[in-house]
Amino acid sequence: MTANLVVPGRIGGNRSATSGAGGAFPGGGHLLVGHEGEPRNVAEFVRILALPAGSFTSGQTIHVNGGMYLP
C-alpha cells in the first residue's frame, strides 16, 4: 500500500465566489514556469502515481505548482 499527497498550486480557470480573490501571488512573485497550471497538469501526475511505475513512491508530499512553492 502506498500513500502520497499531491498539493496543487495555482490552477487557472473560473473560480467560485467562495474560493478567494485570486490575483497577485504572495510577495508579488510569479511562477517559475511563467503561467498558471491546468487541471490536466495535476491529473497527469496523479495518473503516474496510480500506474505500476509509481508503485515504489510512498509517503511523499508532491507539490505540482510550477515553482510557486519550493520546499
Image (tube, grey):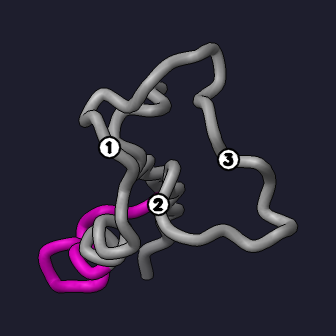
Q: Toward which corner of the image does residue 42 lie, by quadrant?
A: bottom left
Q: Is residue 16 left or right of residue 3?
A: right
Q: Which residue appears at 20% of the width and 85% of the height? A: 51
- The quadrant in which the N terminus is found is bottom left
Would you name the residue on which mark 2 appears? 12
Residue 22: x and y in percent read 67, 47
How many other residues sit within 10 Å of disc 2, few (<14), some (14-19) or many (≥20)?
few
Residue 67 position (above or below residue 20): above
Type of the residue with mark 3? Gly
1 and 3 marks in contact (CB < 8 Å): no
Magenta residues span: 47-59
How many other residues sit within 10 Å of disc 1, few (<14), some (14-19) or many (≥20)?
few
Q: Which residue appears at 40% of the width and 63% of the height? A: 58
Q: Which residue appears at 43% of the width and 25% of the height? A: 30
Residue 3: x and y in percent read 50, 71
Q: Toward which corner of the image does residue 48 lie, by quadrant?
A: bottom left
Type of the residue with mark 2? Gly
1 and 2 marks in contact (CB < 8 Å): yes
Of helix, strand and loop, which one carries label 1?
Answer: loop
Q: Mark 1 or mark 2, which has the lower sequence index?
A: 2
Residue 2: x and y in percent read 43, 75
Would you name the residue on which mark 1 appears? 35
Say which of 28 and 64 sits in front.
28
Would you name the residue on which mark 3 appears? 22
Residue 40 position (above or below residue 61): below
Of helix, strand and loop, which one carries label 3?
Answer: loop
